[in-house]
Amino acid sequence: MARGDLFPSLEPYRTGTLAVSGLHTIYWEEAGNPYGAPVVFLHGGPGAGASPTHRRFFDPRHYRIVILDQRGAGRSTPLGEIRENGIPDLISDLEQLRSMLEIDRWLVFGGSWGSTLALAYAQAHPERVKGLVLRGIFLMRQQEIDWFLYDMRTFFPEAWSTFVTHIPVNERGDLLEAYYRRLTSADPQTRMAAARVWSVYEGACSTLLPSPELVSASGEDNHALGLARMEAHYFRNNKLTPESALLENVDRIRHIPAIIVQGRYDVVCPIRTADELHRAWPEADYIVVPDAGHSAMEPGIRSALVQATERFKTL
């Protein structure tokens, strides 16, 4: 295997569910080496869920690979559930899972929304984090949310046109509220139609070059519903206080080894956010991939992430 390629496909050696509240049950799995260095993979979205490909960022001979679907996402139940679903809840879930698996400290790997959750978790529990691999940085600030809703049209006007056209003209002044109403509608057809448009919009903007496969996958019912409902919910209801909290609290994790991987032409999570994080945290290694967009499957980003997990073998 050439250094930087994904590792071969593998199946989990253990799977399970964990009831984290009276409402939510999360799916988890372990793959690789049961006695290896623990690493937890935090998927994006929020709401996107994990996939078998995500196991392949890690050498299965070295790592004990823990993957979960966050509340309301993927194989966790109920799908798309926004009640009892906030950043403190997800941090608590990670701690419950870590404790159940009898892991003392782990490497935390997260991209896009996963980078948000990884930073929030590490700042809440720095003593449990051996290192961080972060990709496509999103810090949950209003300017980043507004960019997603309105300003991605700068680069993807066709995709944005489809996104905005789903909403009547008289509601377009607040696209988040308009989509939130539809995504939380009592009518399942209304929810699903809005979810597909939202999810396909994001998928169409996630790669440097067009990816019909990603756009098609983005429209799949379960993926679209989990992603769109969770993103609209978090954008609307789970803003950080202060909104720059993840930057302001970098001192809590400054001592933790970290690698930040960012696509130069990431339109979903623009590079200016990663640059701000790096300037606040110069101790973290910062890798800009010059020919990549947002997706972790962009060739250059995929390679940089595998190389990062290889480097962390020495921890």
Image (cartoon, grey):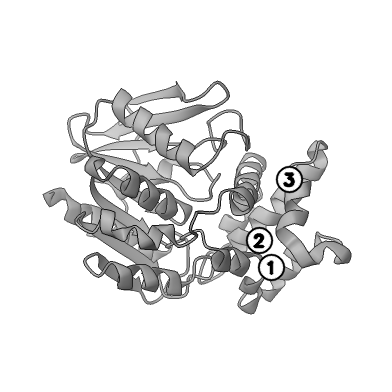
Which of the two residues, 166 or 7, is positioned nearer the viewer here? 166
Residue labelled with disc 2:
201
User: Are the residues flagged by discs 1 and 2 in contact, CB closer than 8 Å?
Assistant: yes
How far apart marks 1 and 3 lie (CA) works out to 19 Å
Query: Which of labels 3 and 2 is toward the front?
Result: 3
Disc 3: CA contacts within 10 A as few (<14), some (14-19) or many (>=20): many
Residue labelled with disc 1:
159
Q: Amino acid at mark 1?
A: Ala
Q: Reading the chain from its start, which is encountered first: label 1 or label 3?
A: 1
Q: Quadrant of the N terminus?
A: bottom left
Disc 1: CA contacts within 10 A as few (<14), some (14-19) or many (>=20): some
From the viewer's perspective, is residue 239 above or below residue 24? below
Query: Which of labels 1 and 3 is toward the front?
Result: 3
SS under mark 3: helix
What residue is rendered at 46% in x and 40% in y? 88
**Which mark is drawn over residue 150?**
none
Disc 2: CA contacts within 10 A as few (<14), some (14-19) or many (>=20): many
Question: Does residue 296 show up?
Answer: no
Q: Amino acid at mark 3?
A: Leu
Give the x, y percent position of residue 290: 37, 77
In the drawing, does residue 223 fall left or right of residue 178?
Answer: left
Q: Choose top left, top right, bottom left or bottom right for residue 151.
A: bottom right
Which of the two residues, 147 or 17, is positioned nearer the viewer here? 147
User: Are the residues flagged by discs 3 and 2 in contact, CB closer than 8 Å?
Assistant: no
How far apart marks 3 and 2 lie (CA) works out to 15 Å
Question: Does residue 186 show up?
Answer: yes
Which of the two residues, 65 or 46, is positioned nearer the viewer here? 46
What residue is rendered at 22% in x and 38% in y? 105
Give the x, y percent position of residue 104: 21, 33
